[in-house]
Image (spheres, rainbow, N blue to C red):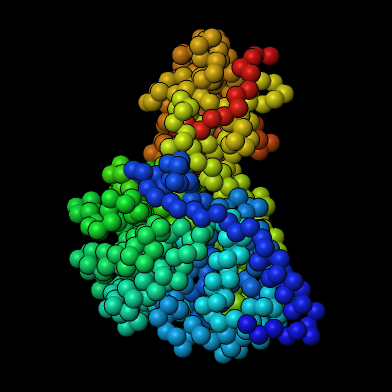
Amino acid sequence: MKLALASPRAAQFILLVLLLVHRERAAAVTLSTSSRWIVDEAGHRVKLACVNWPSHLEPVVTEGLGRQPVGNIATTITALGFNCVRLTYPITLATNASLSSITVRQSLLAHGLAETIGGVEVNNPGFLDLTLIESFKAVVNSLGENNVMVILDNHVSKPAWCCGNDDGNGFFGDRDFDPDVWVDGLGNMATIFAGVPNVVGMSLRNELRGPRQNSQDWYTYMQRGAEAVHAANPRALVIMGGLSYDYDLSFLDAMEVSVSFAAENKLVFELHWYSFSDARAWELENANEVCGRAALDFARRGGFLLSRGFPLFLSEFGADFRGGDLKDNRYYPCAAAVAAELDLDWAFWALQGSYALRQGVAGMDEVYGVLDWSWSKPRNETVLPRIQALQRPLQGPGYAEALPYTVLFHPLTGLCAVRCAATATTLELGPCNETDAWAYAPPASKLVLRDAAAAGLPCLRAEGRGQPARLSAEACGDALSTWRLASDSAMHVAVDAAPGLRGGGMLCLDVGADGRSIVTNPCACLRGDGGCDPERQWFKLITSTRRVAHKPATLA
């Protein structure tokens, strides 16, 4: 490593390195699988709540090093509640010494990124004269120092933005995708990081696609790649993506993967899901009907693996949260509800607020980014709860000591139904870690606070249009306290109101005009109208076994 010792910044960096030498490293994390769950060495569930961080674009330099110190980025990741990074790389980083041995400075200069060099000089001066592979290792180490797990994701072969059907990176045998070179690269990368304690898994290949794709070659080469990774690093989870841009694993319904290490419980599968997979439907059709179809389709294209005893990692999903994208506005609450209901492991796209270089544009903004363009703060504080609501595990080994209960999750906000402290008889949206434990028996039954059920207290009742849904011990089980799921999305929680009740007909749980209280209103957008937006009325009934701190079940 070459350092400009005359620079005050360089002197600070040397001091930081010396301090980090004595800093306690993150303890080794060895993960495996137990049925559909990812677990630690004690057999307790570890939920992957990851964020994607790219290093696969043309400069092969991890994004953001010109914006913020790498340690600051790592601490921000943990402060936002993520426990894991899906760190991308091109396979040539592990197979082409002429690429991996050039320095960060040389690579950035070769791509005309003088401004980025200046940013790295200010924020991460010791990185400029690291080779590309050394720089990549340093990012992994910084994450480890902040107890962040890493999944190494081979995103492409040739460094570039991903993806297109004709970009040469799509499928085995494409112009830039030699399967033998790829297998060697996976083995090399697994070897390099075999002793790095926070590298917990390797994703074999991102978004296989294109006219050459077929399941026969998928089995041939993905199994070879899996064997190469496991032979070089038996600690690591081996993560297999599907066809059609990681959208489709349905072919596994007919034939399972065959690997020599199956008994060692290291195999995980991954899917991606974005709104643009069904863009016209989200934009033009009834959102309840589209969401219902999408949930069923998720099960068909890979969700069935959970019942087969394999973890399923939703390794890319995300949305433009600026509010102007209709398809994303409708898709994301639906996807979040599915992810919460299945309690999936996941990786949000993406961390980066901007790119050094993407598709020929220097400094391009990333509207899907958790961080803003400068990487200095969250892009939108109001949407963070929508992501963070999915970070807590709800089920799995280590949580089975608690009896199952129901959570009323509001995916549009990422909040849950909790009792209003001021009244104790009405509900409001609040943090999901403060949720009450409800008892509910589908397809139609009372919603009862579980800790009060034995005493006959209290059930949730509809009072009328625009009125707060209220906890009451009166006539539990009548029409106004018998709730059912009334739409294709399975997220309209409804009662059949008596004809004489103000605003009668079918009433659904809704969010009040204050944006916090939970009321009932006529059910919206149940079918047909593609111009109707029902997301405020979407409440997902989710089963959890995680312990909650119950509030006293008393009526005012």
Position of residue 408 measured from the top left corner of the image (x, y, whole percent):
52, 32
For the image, the number of numbered tags is 0
Vertical comparison of 175 with 53: above or below? below
Residue 552 position by quadrant: top right
Residue, x 59% and y 18% (percent of image)?
471
The residue under the point 27% across, 53% down is: 262
Residue 8 visible here: yes
Residue 108: give x, y in percent of width and height: 59, 85
The answer to which of 348 and 69 lies nearer the viewer is 69
Asked if residue 280 shows in the view, the reply is no
Work out whether residue 118 or residue 415 is closer to the camera in this orientation and state it. Answer: 118
Q: In the rendered image, which quarter contains the N terminus?
A: bottom right
In this rendering, position of residue 317 left or right of residue 123? left
Q: Quadrant of the C terminus?
A: top right
- Vertically, is 302 above or below 350? above
- Can you say whether 510 is above or below 467 in the image? below
- Residue 468 place in picture, x, y as percent: 62, 25
Residue 343: x and y in percent read: 45, 42
Is 325 placed left or right of 250 in the picture?
right
Q: Tell me if 23 is positioned left or right of 144 in this view.
A: right
Which residue is found at the position 54% from the left and 38% from the top? 410
Which image quarter: residue 463?
top right
Q: Residue at x 64, y 14 (%)?
A: 554
